[in-house]
Amino acid sequence: MGMRVRTTNGTERELGQDMLATLRAGLRGPVLVPGDEGFESSRTVWNAMIDRTPALVARCLGTADVAAAVQFAREQDILLCIKGGGHNIAGLAVADGALMLDMSMMRGVWVDGERRMARAQAGCLLGDVDRETQMHGLAAVLGFVSLTGITGLTLGGGFGYLTRRWGWTSDNVAGMDVVTADGRLVRASERENPDLFWGLRGGGGNFGVVTGIDYVLYDVGPEIVGGAVAWPGSETARVLELYRTLIESAPPELTLLALIRPAPPAPWLPKEIHGQPIAAIVACYSGRVEEGETLVAPIKKFGKPVGDILVRRPYVQQQALFDATQPKGRRYYWKSEYLPDVKAELCDTLVTHAARFASPHSALILFDVAGALNRLPAEHSAVGNRDARYVVNITSAWERSEDDARNIEWARSAWSDTKPFSTGGNYVNFQTYDESAERLQAALGPALPRLAAIKTKWDPGNVFRTNRNVAPAGSHVS
Ligand SMILES: Cc1cc2nc3c(=O)[nH]c(=O)nc-3n(C[C@H](O)[C@H](O)[C@H](O)COP(=O)(O)OP(=O)(O)OC[C@H]3O[C@@H](n4cnc5c(N)ncnc54)[C@H](O)[C@@H]3O)c2cc1C
């Protein structure tokens, strides 16, 4: 008895046991089918709204496994999907009936302290890279939640606490190793295949399977000043006003987030306010700690906080600060926009929607990304959005499917009121499963024609299609 697989044009067909044996013989890593131990953990992704089942999971142990699996999928015409950290909210890592390349066993990190470079295998999570680079007092420009996959994040752009100083994550990549649609291993960098390198920095998984990424590193930590101060929800308008004042003069070493949500049951927040609205400012100062302490003093002195964990702490701890509030297995729906500034009217809008959260896990977040990314030319790489100075993210999170409609409605309504404040751009990596072609256009805009040409050259058959697809006549398959 064989198994049902999905082809690239969406039809189903039988794959015989002999072919499964051929695939298994060609890989060092295991190939899992439904029912095998580990299959469920590969199949499931961070967002429980996504419930899809691939036919086969290849847990690749190295680049040769990746090449063999890509070749097999192409020869057998089986839909291919690639799972990095599985954190994409749209669930782009998993497709029904597909052959999934699960990269989670490729998590090696090698740091060259002298050259200030790290080479990371594509299955790494952010925390894997931070842990190794911090041994050298160095850090790559990565995101805010340590359990996110490096590859999905980097291919879509990427931003975090170091973005103000050094730009998008993808601005700080020296090169990538890529297995192309025809199973070849190529290098993408400024010198080697520069067109591919240009497209990979923003264009997602459209062009091949990335097996390794070389990151440029910077002096950061190991100790920084970071954490959060929270006030009762009744203070939200004043806290947002403070946030607006602080971001006016904050140096690039200081990244500030405004976070409005019902209080999570975190140990640093008193039990009585768990579930009650709070407004918080999250800070990370990555320069000299003494200067950081002076700069965050006005935050700590402001009003009457209900909690304050803004202190000297290890950078790796800061990078994991949000992990517990974003667990795998909840239902999530986000909407985001890039902003040129944070207007008082936008803050009023956030206050209005904070008064009607549909779930205790949802949040409204403002991120400051202004700085280095704005100084590069628009055509530097596909990620673009060089006019983005802030990000607003409306994050709906809840537990039960019967609450889907209510929570999605909350996010969509808050989004519709924040859209007028947008640069017109949005972050491709924050797009949900139901985003339209117009949203992709808004996210990647002027880069799309060039991305389509790169796609035609490197993946003419659209083998890599379970993504925000840039193929000329392409459409997203899920
Ligand atoms: C809790 C949470 C926090 C986040 N915080 C941030 C943040 O601070 N900053 C930020 O910039 N973004 C952030 N994101 C967004 C994040 O960048 C995207 O969700 C990203 O897609 C995650 O990458 P992943 O590898 O985990 O995803 P996956 O779901 O595994 O993959 C995402 C896409 O990348 C492709 N892909 C994965 N690996 C490869 C590979 N090796 N080769 C080719 N294609 C590949 C997949 O096929 C898929 O299309 C966050 C997301 C979550 C859920």
Image (cartoon, rainbow, N blue to C red):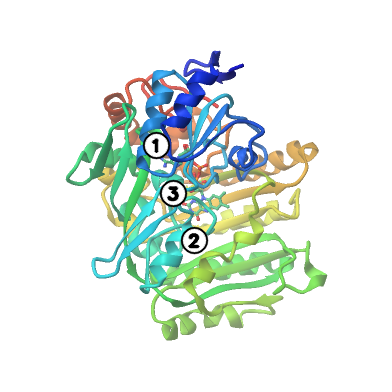
Front tag of 3 and 2: 3
What residue appears at the point 30 percent right and 44 percent down from the top-left corner?
177
108 vs 298, left or right, is: left
> Disc 2 marks which residue?
127
Residue 39 in view (yes/no): yes
Counting residues from the start of the chain, the first of labels 1 and 3 encountered is 1
265 vs 147, left or right, is: right
Question: Mark 3 belongs to which amino acid?
Answer: Met
Q: How far apart are marks 3 and 2 (CA)?
A: 14 Å
Front tag of 1 and 2: 1
The residue carrying mark 3 has its beta carbon less than 8 Å from ligand 1: no
Q: Using the image, determine if residue 227 lies above or below residue 109.
A: below
Considering the numbered disc 1 on the image, is that residue within a helix, a strand or a loop?
helix
Considering the numbered disc 2 on the image, is that residue within a helix, a strand or a loop?
helix
Give the x, y percent position of residue 441: 42, 32
Cβ atoms under marks 3 and 2 closer than 8 Å: no
The answer to which image quadrant residue 27 occupies is: top left
> Disc 3 marks which residue?
106
> Disc 1 marks which residue?
66
Cβ atoms under marks 1 and 3 closer than 8 Å: no
Question: Mark 2 belongs to which amino acid?
Answer: Gly
